[in-house]
Image (cartoon, rainbow, N blue to C red):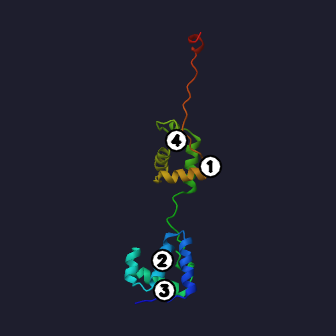
Amino acid sequence: MESLNLSQKQLSKLENSLSKCTDVRIFKRTLGLLEVARGKPISQVASLLGVDRRSVYNWIKVYKSSPTLKSISDAPRSGRPSLWTQDIVRCLEAALMNRPDDYGYRAMGWTTSLLREHIVAYKGIKIADDTIREKLHELGYVWKRPRYVLLPDPDHDKKNA
């Protein structure tokens, strides 16, 4: 059974960080460390936090080696590589310079769904509508609802005379 003996200063530092913590993962790890330091069994702490016991053991090991909040933070990760290439951005920008009916679509204005369909047709890559919206925002495009304006009635004066 692993124990965690913390000084009063370390305990108060961890307790204070709980109220200021904005990252759920760090909050959970800090709470786990505090509970183990208060004498709760690791299996109970793991069950309480919804994690595996090995995770709690890892938090203790890492915190013992370097007792800082940064040590229990997640390391930066590369994440999934972006699908956006310059080629796809050029395809998107070229499409936006023209109307959809120029490409044979039965529409007068672009929608994100239609842009997605266009990118699939020309580049063979499926991109989510939300991702297209984000890229459009990055490129400085603003979406506005189309306004239909009726032409004035040419016989208005005759009718009201």
Q: Nearer the viewer, mark 4 or mark 2?
A: 2
Dot 3 lies on which element?
helix
| Mark 4 surroundings: few (<14), some (14-19) or many (≥20) residues within 10 A | some
Number of numbered markers: 4
How far is the residue under mark 1 from the one under mark 4?
15 Å
Which of the two marks, 1 or 2, is nearer to us in this view?
2
**Residue kind at label 4, given as amino acid type:** Trp
Q: Earlier in the sequence, mark 2 or mark 3?
A: 2
| Rendered view: 133 above or below 105 | below
**Which amino acid is tagged 3?**
Lys
Residue pictured at 43% horizontal, 80% vertical: 55
Label 1: how many Cα within 10 Å (few below 14, some 14–19, many 20+): few
Please give the name of the residue rendered at 58% of the width and 51% of the height, measured from the top-left corner: 137
> Which residue has dot 1 on it?
140
Which mark is first along the chain, 4 or 3? 3
> Which-is-in-front pick, marks 3 and 1?
3
The label on residue 110 is 4
Kindly identify which numbered label has been placed on residue 31.
Answer: 2
Quadrant of the drawing holding the N terminus: bottom left
* Rendering coords of residue 3 (x, y %): 45, 89
Question: CB atoms at circles 1 and 2 under 8 Å apart?
Answer: no
Instruction: Name the kind of residue labelled 1 in the image.
Output: Gly
Mark 2 to mark 3 CA distance (whole Å): 15 Å
Report the front residue among 107 and 124: 107
Residue linked to disc 3: 61
Q: Residue at x 55, y 34 (%)?
A: 147
